[in-house]
Image (cartoon, coloured by chain):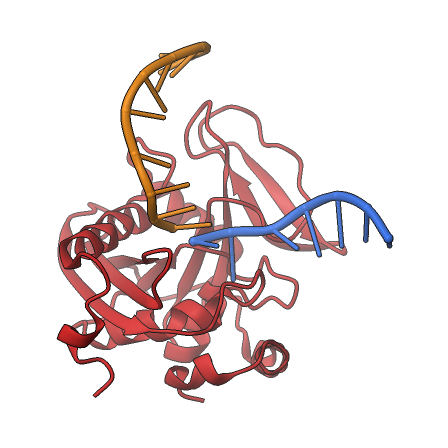
Chain colours: A red, B blue, C orange
DNA sequence: GCGACAG
DNA sequence: ATCTTGTCGC
């Protein structure tokens, strides 16, 4: 299914689709050496259906910005916990297709398999594009875990019914942990190792941190809803 | 019925 | 997520 059709799905249909996709998830070691990594994020005005998507690509592990891509698209799919992908993936997919070269790994702001149906936005986007993806969330959606020690890079496993689905990572002391889970085509430990190398003094790893700054910047620059000027509904 | 609930 | 200044703590 093309993501441009997501906004017409009902929540029940979206859940059925997640259950269909989940059988294709691959959590395994990424063999190819990682030379580039990118972060993706979304921003929007509270009373508008316009989404501002952005992707920032870096060389790895030196983390120098080498490319960016943005897109503005419409959605009528509301935010529903557990169905975030149906609201944000279409805009991100447009920004992804506008990248002249794809990164070896993509980090998304949200969960990977640390999801009730193992279908967080990072997993969903990985299945859609085939790209290795990692979910880096600022808060927990699913899974039980113990608070990690207040020590840089302290880890605490996230479980669901005895299954390891992610890691709560202390990316910065005296700050709440971030929740890392693989999206697709990468392992859990590899996801955590990669995210650790992307921490540069802030709680949020550089890929999604820079993507967040970028999408907020273009949202402010575009001002209020410029739907007509952009000709999105011709 | 009650509590939880990515962005 | 977004709306928003100052302010408490390391």
Quarter-wise, where is residue A114 in the image? bottom right
Above or below: residue A76 compared with residue A79: below
The spot of residue A232 in percent (x, y) is: 22, 80
* Residue found at x 58% / y 63%: A82
Asked whether the viewer can see residue A151, the reply is yes
A48 lies left or right of A11: left
Asked whether the viewer can see residue A100, the reply is no
Above or below: residue A134 compared with residue A157: below
Above or below: residue A147 compared with residue A210: above
Quarter-wise, where is residue A83 in the image? bottom right
* Residue found at x 27% / y 76%: A94
The spot of residue A91 in percent (x, y) is: 32, 71
Above or below: residue C5 compared with residue A136: above
Is A62 in front, or is A52? A52
Q: In which quarter of the image is the N terminus of chain A?
A: bottom left
A8 lies left or right of A216: right
The spot of residue A150 in percent (x, y) is: 52, 24
* Residue found at x 15% / y 52%: A65
A194 lies left or right of A231: right
Q: Quadrant of the C terminus of chain A?
A: bottom left
Is A21 in front, or is A104? A21
Quarter-wise, where is residue A107 in the image? bottom left
Q: How many marks?
A: 0
* Residue found at x 18% / y 56%: A223
The spot of residue A88 in percent (x, y) is: 40, 67
């Amino acid at each position: 299914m093309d993501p441009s059709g997501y906004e017409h799905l009902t929540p029940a249909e979206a859940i059925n689709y997640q259950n269909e996709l989940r059988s294709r998830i691959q959590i395994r070691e990424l063999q190819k050496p990682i030379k580039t990594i990118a972060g993706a994020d979304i921003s929007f005005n509270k009373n508008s259906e316009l989404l501002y998507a952005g992707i920032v690509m870096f060389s790895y592990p030196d983390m120098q910005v080498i490319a960016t891509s943005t897109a503005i698209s419409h959605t009528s799919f509301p935010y529903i916990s557990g169905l975030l992908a149906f609201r944000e993936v279409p805009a991100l997919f447009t920004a992804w297709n506008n990248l002249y070269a794809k990164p070896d790994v993509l980090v998304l702001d949200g969960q990977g398999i640390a999801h009730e149906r193992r279908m967080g936005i990072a997993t969903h986007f990985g299945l859609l594009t085939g790209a290795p993806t990692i979910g880096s969330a600022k808060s927990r959606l699913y899974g039980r875990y113990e608070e990690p020690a207040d020590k840089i890079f302290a880890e605490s496993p996230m479980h669901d019914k005895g299954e390891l689905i992610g890691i709560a990572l202390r990316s910065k002391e005296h700050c709440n942990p971030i929740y890392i889970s693989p999206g697709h085509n990468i392992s859990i430990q590899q996801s955590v190792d990669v995210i650790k190398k992307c921490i540069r003094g802030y709680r949020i790893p550089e890929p999604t941190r820079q993507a967040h700054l970028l999408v907020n910047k273009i949202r402010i620059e575009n001002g209020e809803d410029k739907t007509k000027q952009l000709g999105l509904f011709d």
